[in-house]
Amino acid sequence: MKFKMMFLILLSSVLGVMAADNYVRTGESLNWVNRSGSDVANGSLINMGTGYGVALQAITNGGTGVVRQTGVWRFEISSTDAFTNGLPAFYSDGETVTTTSTTNDYVGMAVSTATGSTSTTVYVDIQLNAPQMLYAP
């Protein structure tokens, strides 16, 4: 009986801390309205204006679909890029990431090694819900 009481007290204190009145859900995925002017393919890296996400489904122009903003994803790279584990990855277009930071936004960190001359893809741990910043090595 004493154990049950202690467990209930502990549980209520934990739930009380985590049960804020205004909590809605985790923010890893969200609904996004496609106003890009073209359809978006499933798995595409999307520039949402203030951040980036990966489409979890095909989203027609004007339609709404789910976009994920966390996780490790496989993206294509150009034949001139060379990624090492831990190197920043930048948005190139909906299908590719690049090591070029000059005119591209940071989207995450490479978690694999890939050279464009021998590999066509790299794994990237996307950190897309963080504010975009300029990267200066």
Image (cartoon, grey):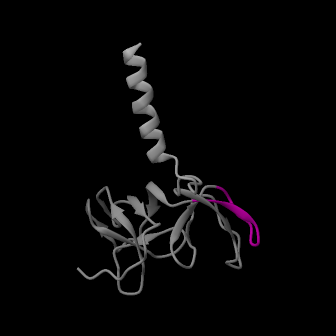
Q: Position of residue 57 (x, y in %)?
A: 66, 56
> Which residue is at the front of the view, 20 or 103?
20
Q: Main secondary structure of the magenta part?
A: loop
> Which residues lie in the magenta part?
57-67
Question: Residue 15 lies in magenta, yes or no?
Answer: no
Return the residue found at the far right: 62
* Image coords of residue 128 (percent x, y): 46, 66
Q: Quadrant of the N terminus?
A: top left
Determine the image quadrant of residue 37.
bottom right
Residue 34: image location, x then y, percent: 69, 71
- Judged from this view, the residue extending furthest toward the top is 1
Q: In the picture, residue 84 is in which quadrant?
A: bottom left
Image height of 106 relative to 16, above or below: below
Horizontally, residue 37 falls left or right of residue 27, namely right
The reply to whether residue 120 is in sight is no
Nearer to me, 28 or 4: 4
Q: Position of residue 2 (x, y in %)?
A: 37, 16
